[in-house]
Amino acid sequence: MNIAKMEMANALFNQIYIKTEKSFFGLKTKVTYAPTKSNVVGITLDYNPTEGQKVKAILEANLSELIAVLKKEGRPATSDNGNLRLNLCYSQDHEFATLHLQQFQGFEYHTVGKIRFATGDEAKKLLSIFVK
């Protein structure tokens, strides 16, 4: 997925530990997590309303609450076409993650909560939930 076209791209690119490079005549943007020099990739995951509420609870939990919330809610299952969408950018070494939950209403997606940025152990724990 082209990270530059994601709604959270500006927030991501403004992080001090993110490096961007334009290539292919400015049409392609290479995104790197600077501390580890790992490439950043982007994906989107869709969820039905029930599973989307699990995602919301996970994203709102702080690191110390994350395991308890995951035990209570369970791992959210994606759907082919849901009204909640998780935009996820992460470094390939799993040391960095950005998570942005949106809900489809009125023919467009609207942000639910805040964009969450995570590094180190927090990023690894969050990514273990969403990335196989």
Image: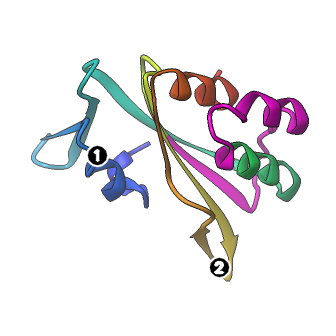
Counting other residues with Cα less than 10 Å from the Cα at mark 2, is it few (<14), some (14-19), or many (20 or more)?
Answer: few
The location of residue 10, given as percent across then percent down, is 31, 58
Counting other residues with Cα less than 10 Å from the Cα at mark 1, is it few (<14), some (14-19), or many (20 or more)?
Answer: few
Q: For marks 2 and 1, give the one nearer the viewer.
A: 1
Identify the element where label 1 is drawn.
loop
Left or right, 69 with respect to 9, comes to: right
Left or right, 23 with respect to 98, comes to: left
Left or right, 129 with respect to 34, comes to: right
- Residue 107 circle label: 2
Amino acid on which disc 2 is placed: Phe
Could you tell me which residue is drawn at 25 percent across and 20 percent down? 37
The location of residue 17, given as percent across then percent down, is 25, 35
- Residue 111 circle label: none
Residue 75 at least partly seen: no
- Residue indicated by mark 1: 15
Whether 68 is drawn above or below 56: the answer is above
* Quadrant occupied by the C terminus: top right
**Quarter of the image where one finds residue 58:** top right
Residue span colored magenta:
59-88
Q: Residue furthest left?
A: 25
Q: Residue furthest front?
A: 64
Residue 49 at least partly seen: yes
Could you tell me which residue is drawn at 32 percent across and 52 percent down? 4
Query: Looking at the image, which is closer to me, 87 or 33?
Result: 33
Residue 68 magenta: yes
